[in-house]
Image: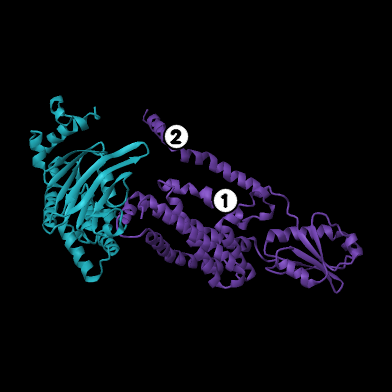
Chain colours: A cyan, B purple
Amino acid sequence: MEEKIVTIHNVSRSFGKHQVLKNISLEMKSGEIFGLLGPSGAGKTTIVKQLVGLDLPSEGEIYLFQEKMPNLKLIEKTGYMAQSDALYGELSAKENLEFFAALYGLKGAKRKKRIKVVMETVSLSEHINKLVSTYSGGMKRRLSLAIALLHQPQLLILDEPTVGIDPVLRKSIWNAFYELKEIGTTIIVTTHVMDEAEKCDRLGMIRDGRLIALGTPEELKNKTNSTSIEEAFLVYGGAGNENKRSSHSNSSANYS
Amino acid sequence: MRINALVIRILRQIIRDKRTMALLIFAPILVLSMLYLVFNGDDYIPKIGFVDIPEQIQDQLNLDDAEITQYDSIHQAKKALSNHELDAYFLFENQKPSVVLEGSDPSINGSVMKWMQTALKPLQQNAPQKEIAVDYLYGSSEMRQFDYIGPILLGFFIFFFVFLIAGVSFLRERTTGTLERLLSSPLRKWEIVMGYVIGFGIFTMIQATIIAWYSIYVLDMMMEGAFGYVLLITLLVSLTALTLGILLSSFANNELQMIQFIPLVIVPQVFFSGLFNLETVSSWLSWIGPITPLYYASEALRGVMIKGYGWDMIYKDLLILFGFSLLFMILNIAALRKYRKL
């Protein structure tokens, strides 16, 4: 099960003169929960968009399931939850689910079953017939997640999945992630919430379009003598005190 | 002070949005200029055919302010009339002067009748007992201005509303992120465009049927041809409006900017679709008509509704409308490349 699911190879992305991603290389294995951690504007969403084929690297390549992106076949194997809730407010939750299920070719009894399962996963079953426009922010987030899970993708790409969701539900959503991991699903999660980062198998810290650190949460904390991911991030990001900076002078030099 | 702050904020917002500012100033200028050009066009000079009129009579007539063409037979004149080469022809039938008008445009009918009165004055002075018999190829003297502009307005309103609604709903799809979500699914770009075309196509077919039915059977708009043709034309009109609306929505960032296309895209089409006599429009502007979809829609609708045209007379207009839709669809698919490259 140590198959490479995602390979990001020397990827850079510029919008005009503004360079958003700077030479990023990453690999993710099957059954892994990989966290992309960084402040807003760091380039997390740009990486995610490239992974789902909505954007192309200016330089470098991206491979999913060891095939080069963009490729429509690979898109079918991927579940994506965008940062903004891409839902149709004038439709009910069920109608939204049916629409997206149809896009992924789910039909009949299978569709019904999957809709039931994913709505249970995000604890929205009792609200399935309500109009999405009457949903709260957290409910919309959960419905977006449910839609991403519908077609049982092998790779789940979730852009800030738990924003606006209360701690109890967040815990149950993470439990769902662990269950998916058990059946071999690879999950990529972006977040700027540090305690959520601790729950990932491995973390990539992004700042100003650069990958500034990579490793398990334990490794990152140990290497920097930190007690929390937040501290570790500060060290790697060069925003901490001057002494700790020397350990990563190369990448931090540009930030001052 | 709070009001001040508000005023400053609003002014700043307007200045930031250069497009809205430009629109506020240039759109009225543009529309007013067009109205000026349309209404202050040259006086219409009627085109009159004379069928075998003896020269001694012609010498008595006042032939200024008209384009006169001589014909040897009624048959030739009739042909010229139905080909729009003539507005009316004049002949003597059993020694009685009579005139046959093309008749589909009440304003041209008016200028022909006005010209006749001045031209024939000398003749009537000699023989006042001779009254002029007036006949119409299409329409009748009872044809109202509404019957003439009705078909155009029918096409226009369908075009206008479909354009706006389709444009705004596609814009929403873009601004709420659902378009991006669609493009991150296996859905193909052409499928998105076709989905919109079919979805709205069904809706607009219902809309077109109701509007056409209402205009013809409730407002008693003149209707010489087949209702099926009217539906076919309006369907193609809405298809064109739909695809153009979706296309232009990719150049708008919000609903307001979509509305801004109305004076730029919709209003000029009205002016050049035949609502006003195109022959009096300044010649340096006359090229606009043939590049607008509504021009062909009006031509076909007017043909069917006033002149009772059938398929062989309108298929060219329909093909051009379909061509417009096809072009816009292809451009739409190309515009979606901005979001996903395959």
Dot 2 amino acid type = Ile
- Indicate the position of residue B101 as horizontal and vertical percent values: 74, 66
Please report contact status of discs 1 and 2: CB closer than 8 Å, yes or no: no
Quadrant in the rendering for residue A60: top left
Q: Residue at x 68, y 61 (%)?
A: B106
Quarter of the rendering occupied by the C terminus of chain B? bottom left
- Indicate the position of residue B249 as horizontal and vertical percent values: 43, 51
Left or right of B22? Residue B95 is right
Residue B77 visible to an observer of this rendering: yes
Left or right of B318? Residue A70 is left
- The numbered mark at residue B268 is 1
Q: Residue at x 31, y 42 (%)?
A: A13
Task: Characterize the local packing of mark 1: few (<14), some (14-19) or many (20 or more) Cα atoms within 10 angstroms.
Answer: some
Which label's residue is closer to the chain start, 1 or 2? 2
Residue B224 visible to an observer of this rendering: no
Subunit that carries the residue with mark 2: B
Left or right of B31? Residue A29 is left
Nearest the eye: B225 or A31 = A31
Left or right of B258? Residue B146 is right
Quadrant in the rendering for residue B8: top left
Dot 1 amino acid type = Pro
